[in-house]
Amino acid sequence: MQRMVNGDLMCYVTLVDDSGQTYQSVGATFELCANQSAYLNKRVNLTYGTVSVNDCQSTEPCGRSRRQTLITQMQIINNANSCSRGTSAGYLPPRLQVGQSGSSVHVGNLNLRQQPGVQGRVVGVLAPGNTFRVLEGPACAGNYVWWKVNTGRTQGWVAEGEPASAVYWLVPDPISN
């Protein structure tokens, strides 16, 4: 779930599927928009239903309505389960954990993004050898496993590695007891 906006007739949402395809202005109930903080930037399962919608584009009652198929329910998917299925689901098995420190072993800069996925706006970079602390994740998008990290200077979502070549770009610090 990328964006939710209340409109005159319904709530309009922007969705991004696992392959990175964006769907804009998908209709949903106003109740879902009222709880948008619970769904934004989360992986969700959608339930559609036929709902009676006011057919007037104003706040004044006009007495006209129509039946419309809208998203009526959203259920947050536990991202860890889908990412942790690893290569059978098209992802590298995650090796990082929330709260853990790590470093970049990539030969070039890795983009830090506002949201998980290659469509997310770039907010910074993680240079080779830089360290970070994991804040959130994993989030699965476009066959990449994404983690929200803090580098000490900025924070953003970064992909853990390249599933096609099975190469990890991020490594966890050894956990010492």
Image: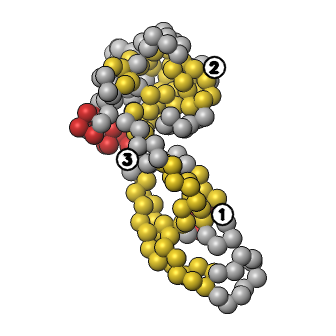
The quarter of the displayed image where residue 172 is located: top left
Specify whether 74 is left or right of 2.
Answer: left
Under circle 3, the secondary element is loop
**Does the rendering let one see residue 99?**
no
Q: CA distance from mark 1 to mark 3?
A: 26 Å
The answer, for residue 174, to whether it is visible in the render is: yes
Relative image position of residue 152 (x, y in whole percent): 60, 19
> Which labelled disc corresponds to residue 6?
1
Q: Is residue 39 left or right of residue 55?
A: left
The residue at the point 48 percent across, 66 percent down is 71
Q: Residue at x 59, y 52 (%)?
A: 3
In the image, what residue type sits under mark 2?
A: Arg
Q: Secondary structure at mark 2?
A: loop
| Pointer 2 residue | 153
Give the CA distance from mark 2 to mark 3: 29 Å
Which numbered dot is residue 78?
3
Residue 97 location, x and y as percent? 39, 29
